[in-house]
Image: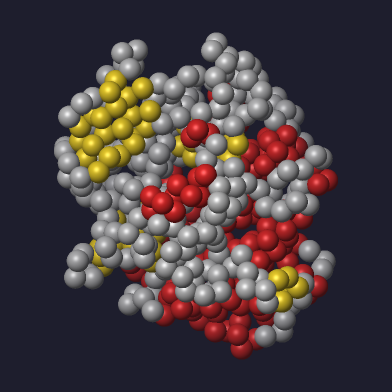
Amino acid sequence: MTIEQDEKITLSYLKLLPGEELLRAYTPDRRYFDTPPSSLNQILRLTRANHDSEIGKYGPSIAALALETVTLEKDPDAPDHLRLYEVVFGRDSLRVAIDLITSYPELARTTVLELAKLQGTEYNTRREEEPGRIVHEVRDENSPIALQLSLERGWGWPYYGTVDATPEFIRTLTAYCRRSEENTGFLAEEYVDKTGQTRTIAYALESAIMWIEQRLKSNPEGLIEFKSVLPMGIENQVWKDSWDSYHHQDGTIANHNQGIASIEVQVTTYDALIDAAELLENVLDNRPRAAELRATAKQLKQTIMDLFWVEDDQKGGYFALGTDRDDHGNLRQLRIRTSNMGHTLNSRLLEGADPEIVRRRELVLDHMLSPEMLNVSGIRTLASDELRFRPGAYHNGSVWLWDTHHIAKGMRRLGYTEAANDLDQRLLKVVAATNLLPEYVRGDDSDYPSTNHNIIDVYDRNYERENRIEQPPQEVQAWTAAAILATKKRLIRSGAILNLPL
């Protein structure tokens, strides 16, 4: 097998797993930036606004952008991989909206409204569309990237291959209604759906709820699982969507021929059901429907506690990344420690004084702050003592800023203020150190935040496929920009003085 390697690259740090062979390694032209970017200015770009008073006026945030002002040795243009995500992704736009809802509620409103217009109305295999399902990726079907994906992977447009956007949609919708005086007015707002029918936001809410209910009822254990119906669809239809992110303790990749369930999707779904029940009862006075959703949520909570918790005498109890199934359909835990379990902190799941709940949330906190999970930049996506850990891997060891921010919010809501504040400071240091609002940074043990500079591809003989195990991040990730802006806004409200531009 021919190896393509840039002679300038030193790969002494590279970790290859059994069955892997190096295919290629090279360093794209570096882009250098003089000062940390303004998170507010980048949110303006991502939402096509000219002023912060216009944030939300023109619809949802797109997912990512290249920085527009560079100082370079070679002055290269933004490479192709920095131009792939200049469109709306359902999950991304909802996360941005909910992180900024305190300062920019209009963004949540228009994000919900625009995604409602694209909500699934039928079963379509090429699009992975289902009634009530919220879209994953929105592209003009005639754009070069859309045409390429349709040709190579068989996708139709818009593409719906995600299971977390729908509960996130409910959470964002209900969060906006809690904060807005229009309340019933927004629920009654009309729009035209993708079939030309006039609908209301209340209809979109109920459709999303019914999608969740159908998924839960049709599953043997009552879980939200994902399994692409396309041969070349997205395999992991969650935020950690890289091929190798869902795996077992021995490194074996999760079985994509059967359904896979992720811990944070179940948690988000649980919260979405409770949020929807409160809205239905308090705003629409629909107590019977609210009671149904609370009963479903109660059962889901018990399922999460029973099926995802791992008792481990050596490491301490923790929530597994998720579950998969063997070829006979038998459920198996993915017993690895990941940042995903930290999402349980930013949920109603672990609230309350029940001794077992308290024990579990304190164990989760301990894991998040352990040397294996915490580095100079934040919380690693995968603990450093897990077999597939690589500090520059997309979801297997790197630190995603939005992920750490989400976990920090959970720590703060449960009273772990000191730990949350520490994570906030780590995130701000990343921006100051990299002069970026990066998608993610390295999860190594260095004392200084850094990003990947190399692109490294391997061939995995065990699975007969190529795997990109390292690449530079997006320069301006919408999730990151929103997380940093929300952090700065919170610090300003608390009276803190910032050393970085807003």
Please say whether residue 358 is visible from this viewpoint.
Answer: no
The image quarter containing residue 370 is top left
Q: Determine whether, in the image, residue 485 is placed left or right of residue 381.
A: right
Q: Find residue 458 and report its image quarter.
A: top left
Q: Position of residue 150 (x, y in %)?
A: 44, 53
Give the left or right position of residue 400, taking residue 171 as reference: left
Q: Residue at (43%, 74%) from the top-left corner?
A: 215
Q: Position of residue 206 (x, y in %)?
A: 61, 77
Picture colour scheme? secondary structure
Q: Quadrant of residue 453?
A: top left
Residue 287 at x, y = what percent? 65, 86
Q: Residue at x 50, y 19 (%)?
A: 30
Q: Residue at (61%, 88%) from the top-left corner?
A: 288
Q: How many marks?
A: 0
Q: Position of residue 57 (x, y in %)?
A: 78, 52
Q: Is residue 42 above or below residue 9?
A: below
